[in-house]
Image: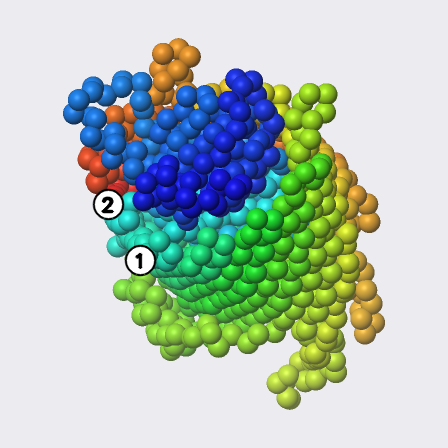
């Protein structure tokens, strides 16, 4: 160390430039055990010299402001040095095995350029860029982690291959993304639904505009994300909250950034799902711009802006569930057997326009080698405007409540000559029904949701200590309004068939009948979510012994989720609807009656004398859930050798204390009153009173990981941990609502819920047999307790027996077991080095079931797989990707009690880009090439139609300018 600080020696060696010289014995060719944490280069190089015995020369100027990578395991000196400085801007200028000279890449390039005219280029020297570089970088992240981690990496701004980060996450092993409006959205990991996934940005928990805790990953455009890590195993330093896993998005750190300073991307995007809709086209656009500027060696900033309009309209037919209880009835003439009948169905054309604006800002200030201050901000504003043309079929006649529509079914069978088709479950899946209503609904839905995420981090380092202080704040808001004009007619005969693609026919078309105005509806909703947190983290680096560092820290967060809704009706002021207000059109994908449409505002004025221009921000907030979390952790990282095999990892414990309270209202039956007075009609008043409640608990969460390095890129990783996921916030509301008349039903939340808990074990074998290559097998076991689901109970209120539905903790636990296989490689072994494959397969099994209808666990798809083929050379990056998932249970919408089954899907996407010159790139993407529908069913019965959505294909063409 005396040589490092001797100014005279540096001057003699490097002239006027300060240098670093460490003298040691010449390095042997054999592998050595390294354990060098990620740190500043000025301290990392001496640590490397000490552990390698290699003499290293480098200027202090070249090392200033550079942070090197962690190096651990049994490696040769060359491999360890390469790993230490990979992607840091440093490069090895010379290395004769006894000594090495390290310089800035720019300096090396300058020397190389002087020699370029005198020497031909080495045909073996290949600069890897594009999709291949992203895959390599992701492998590097996965390899360096001692736990089980999946990674997405992109060192350049806007270089991720997908439009949203959700699409990229969906291709990772064991991850399934649900589709909403045709776009990948929320993600399930390892058989557990999105409500048990913790989402973070730069390691910070973030607010969400969803009623629960779920993160909608499509909110984050790929242009603002530099990478993502999916932590499938846990360790003490990670924020608690993700039983299935933690997804952490990373943004650019401008001082560390090595890519182009300015990136501009723009182009059109076209969705063809709504091509049959009148006065609607699917053409939108995407544009983004990013600028990184280094004001000095100590201060830099990055600014990003994104804007997009997508018109992803689509056709849908949806079922309303089945009357399958004791109140069903007979439907076949002369047969008194009771059968299950559908309550109704609807067809819907969504003429969507979704406008998005996003901004990101990153500031990084490093006045000294030992201290840095960084600030980052993300802002997103998404506005959805949907004109919905719907048709509601059945009008109570299909449901056959207590056999009341027996004659509708028998008369329909007589008129059509076709008897009802009844499956082995006793469900009527096809039938003709007389005088069932066809209600046309011309509706408008608007949604405005904003998200702001910001954080401030200060980091101080010394030879033995790293101290970090972090403060963050995020706020999400959503306001939505649905308003509907409704009109109806009653054809003499209506036929439905749900055995395959749903078919609905009527004896006379809607446009050929007089439409009668019906009661209109409005529905307002509001969600606000605020989350503030502070972290204080310490790391003590140790020079000797089993443990290489000790980490400890504390975290405190304060979160408030507020929810509100308000429903209303409006009576019509006319009877028959004038024909000139309506027009009809047909779906291109479904055999259903003509869909009626019209100008929403004109219909509202004529039918109800209103414009439905209601400000959803006036929605009253009725429920609040406040959650305070305090956490502390202690973790030790270690490195040793067992039987000649290098082993490293960590062991630690995290203690979590949670205090949650909920405030809302409770509805109970009150006095009977005559309404209106003098009418002779008596109704029971419902009385609403304010209530509060909550729960507090503390949990101790131990964890440990071990990584065995067998050399030649082969690792065995072991992990064990106790983990929790806090209950969904919307399940913790205390509000109770009950009906005022029979059937006596009600619903409520449960502020006394305990967290999901699991003990998990992970084993992963990873073989990095080439720079582009990985073969991995991971197996895992989770023992889950306190599972939260919805259950019904009987309660007597004011002499009436009510059936109340609410979330509860399961009294028995269950297991989740799975295996994941990953294989990726170039085809260099058959002479096609510029072609490659990325593939994975995951299998998961569980004895856990939901509490309703015996449904399998939410999010559990037994089989999932990804198969991508790529090409990268001559400026061309191309990928053809296929994703498959098996049937799984999902929550569709904002009510956790509404569980559906999603049928198997195989989707295919294609992407190709061409680097025209060093500055300009063109890219084309085609998504959902197979036009795969979203198909769901209800009650775990395949013939009970849930949804049948056809989103169509998406095409994107954009140009990128970088310099």
* Residue shown at 57% from the left, 74% from the top: 621
Query: What x and y, as percent, mark residue 624?
Result: 63, 71
In the rendered image, the residue lying farthest to the top is: 830
| Extreme-left residue of the structure | 117
User: In front: mark 1 or mark 2?
Assistant: 1
Is any atom of residue 640 visible in this view?
yes
Q: Residues within 10 Å of mark 2 (few under 14, many from 20)?
A: few
**Foreground of the two, 901 or 216:** 216
Residue designated by label 2: 963
Q: Toward the viewer: 541 or 320? A: 541
Indicate how the structure is coloured in the image.
rainbow
Q: Residue at x 52, y 65 (%)?
A: 473
| Residue 594 image position (x, y, % from top left) | 36, 50
Q: Quadrant of residue 651?
A: top right
Examine the rendered structure and indicate whether residue 599 appears above or below residue 673.
above
Q: Secondary structure at mark 2?
A: loop
Label 1 environment density (alpha carbons within 10 Å; few <14, some 14–19, many ≥20): few
Task: Name the residue that disc number 1 marks.
Answer: 295
Question: At numbered mark 1, what does the secondary structure look like: helix, strand or loop?
Answer: strand
Task: Depth check: give the residue in front, 411 or 31.
Answer: 31
If you read the primary sequence from the N terminus, does the residue marked by circle 1 or circle 2 appear first? 1
Q: Is residue 156 left or right of residue 902?
A: left
- Distance between the alpha carbons at the discs numbered 1 and 2: 17 Å
* Left/right of residue 304 with respect to residue 412 in the rendered view: left
What is the quadrant of the C terminus in the image? top left
Q: Residue drawn at (60%, 60%), measured in percent from left and top?
A: 535
Give me the residue at 27% from left, 50% from top.
Answer: 262
């Amino acid at each position: 160390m005396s040589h490092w600080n001797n100014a005279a020696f540096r001057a003699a060696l490097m002239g006027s430039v300060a240098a670093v010289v460490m003298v040691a014995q010449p390095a042997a060719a054999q592998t050595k055990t390294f354990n060098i944490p990620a740190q500043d280069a000025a301290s990392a190089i001496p640590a490397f010299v000490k552990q390698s015995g290699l003499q290293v020369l480098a200027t202090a100027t070249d090392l200033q402001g550079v942070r090197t990578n962690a190096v651990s395991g049994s490696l040769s000196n060359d491999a360890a040095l390469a790993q230490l400085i990979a992607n840091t801007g440093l490069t090895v200028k010379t290395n004769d095995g006894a000594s090495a000279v390290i310089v800035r890449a720019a300096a090396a390039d300058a020397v190389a350029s002087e020699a370029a005219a005198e020497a031909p280029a080495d045909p073996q020297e290949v600069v890897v860029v594009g999709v291949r570089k992203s895959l390599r970088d992701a492998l590097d992240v996965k390899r360096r982690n001692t736990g089980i981690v999946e990674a997405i990496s992109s060192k350049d701004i806007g270089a991720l291959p997908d439009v949203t980060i959700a699409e990229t996450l969906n291709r990772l092993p064991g991850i399934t993304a649900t589709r909403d409006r045709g776009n990948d959205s929320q993600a399930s990991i390892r058989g557990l639904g999105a409500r048990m996934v913790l989402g973070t940005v730069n390691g910070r928990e973030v607010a969400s505009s969803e009623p629960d805790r779920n993160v909608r990953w499509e909110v984050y455009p790929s242009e603002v994300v530099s990478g993502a890590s999916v932590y499938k195993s846990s360790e003490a330093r990670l924020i608690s909250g993700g039983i299935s896993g933690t997804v952490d998005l990373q943004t650019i750190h401008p001082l560390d950034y090595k890519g182009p300073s300015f990136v501009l991307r723009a182009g059109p995007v076209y969705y063809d799902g709504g091509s049959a809709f009148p006065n609607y086209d699917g053409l939108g656009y995407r544009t983004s711009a990013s600028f990184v500027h280094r004001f000095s060696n100590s201060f830099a900033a990055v600014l990003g802006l994104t804007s997009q309009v997508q018109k992803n309209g689509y056709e849908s037919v949806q079922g309303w569930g089945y009357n399958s209880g004791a109140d069903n009835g007979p439907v076949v003439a002369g047969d008194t057997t009771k059968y299950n009948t559908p309550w109704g169905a609807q067809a819907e054309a969504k003429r969507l326009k979704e406008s998005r604006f996003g901004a990101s800002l990153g500031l990084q200030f490093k006045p000294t080698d030992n201290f840095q201050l960084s600030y980052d901000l993300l802002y997103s504003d998404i506005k959805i405007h949907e004109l919905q043309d719907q048709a509601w079929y059945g009008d109570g006649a299909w449901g056959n409540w207590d056999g009341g529509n027996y004659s509708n079914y028998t008369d329909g069978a007589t008129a059509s000559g076709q008897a009802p088709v009844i499956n082995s479950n006793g469900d009527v899946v096809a039938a003709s029904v007389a005088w069932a209503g066809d209600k046309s609904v011309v509706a408008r839905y608007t949604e405005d949701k904003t998200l702001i995420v910001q954080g401030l981090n200060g980091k101080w380092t010394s030879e033995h200590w790293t101290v970090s202080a972090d403060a963050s704040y995020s706020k999400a808001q959503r306001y939505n309004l649905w308003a509907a004009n409704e009109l109806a007619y009653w054809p003499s005969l209506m036929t439905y068939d749900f055995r395959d693609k749903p078919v609905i026919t009527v004896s006379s078309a809607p446009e050929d009948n007089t439409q009668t105005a019906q009661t209109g509806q409005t529905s307002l909703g509001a969600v606000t979510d605020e989350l503030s947190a502070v972290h204080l983290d310490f790391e003590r680096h140790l020079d000797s012994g089993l443990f290489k560092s000790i980490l400890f820290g504390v975290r405190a967060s304060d979160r408030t989720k507020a929810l509100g809704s308000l429903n209303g009706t409006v009576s019509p002021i006319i009877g028959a609807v004038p024909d000139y207000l309506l027009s009809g059109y047909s779906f291109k994908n479904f055999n259903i009656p003509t869909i009626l449409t019209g100008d929403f505002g004109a219909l509202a004025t004529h039918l109800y004398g209103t414009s439905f221009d209601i400000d959803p921000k006036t929605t009253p907030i009725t429920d609040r859930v406040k959650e305070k979390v305090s956490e502390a952790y202690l973790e030790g990282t270690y490195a040793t050798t067992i039987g000649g095999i290098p082993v490293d990892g960590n062991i630690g414990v995290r203690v979590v204390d949670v205090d949650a309270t909920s405030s809302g209202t409770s509805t109970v039956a009150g006095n009977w009153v005559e309404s209106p007075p003098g009418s002779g009609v008596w109704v029971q008043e419902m009385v609403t009173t304010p209530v509060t409640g909550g729960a507090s608990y503390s949990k101790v969460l131990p964890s440990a990981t071990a990584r065995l390095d067998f050399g030649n890129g082969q690792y065995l990783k072991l992990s064990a941990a106790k983990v929790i996921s806090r209950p969904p916030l919307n399940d913790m509301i205390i509000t109770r609502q009950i009906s005022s008349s029979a059937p006596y039903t009600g619903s409520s939340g449960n502020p006394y819920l305990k967290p999901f808990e699991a003990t998990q074990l992970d084993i992963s074998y990873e073989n990095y047999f080439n720079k582009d290559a990985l073969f991995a097998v991971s197996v895992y076991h989770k023992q889950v307790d306190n599972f939260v689901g919805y259950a019904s109970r009987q309660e007597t209120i004011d002499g009436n027996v009510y059936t109340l539905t609410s979330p509860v903790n399961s009294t028995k636990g269950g297991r989740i077991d799975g295996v994941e296989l990953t294989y990726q490689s170039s085809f260099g072994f058959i002479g096609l080095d510029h072609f490659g494959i990325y593939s994975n397969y995951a299998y998961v099994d569980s004895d856990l079931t939901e509490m309703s209808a015996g449904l399998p666990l939410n999010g559990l798809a037994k089989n999932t797989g990804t198969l991508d083929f790529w090409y990268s050379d001559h400026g061309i990056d191309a990928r053809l990707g296929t994703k498959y998932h098996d049937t799984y249970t999902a929550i569709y919408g904002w009510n956790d009690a509404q569980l559906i089954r999603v049928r198997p899907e195989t989707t295919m996407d294609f992407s190709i880009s061409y680097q025209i010159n060093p500055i300009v790139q063109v890219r084309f993407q085609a998504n959902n090439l197979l036009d795969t529908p979203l198909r769901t069913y209800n009650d775990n019965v395949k013939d009970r139609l849930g949804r049948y959505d056809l989103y169509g294909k998406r095409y994107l063409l954009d140009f990128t300018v970088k310099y």
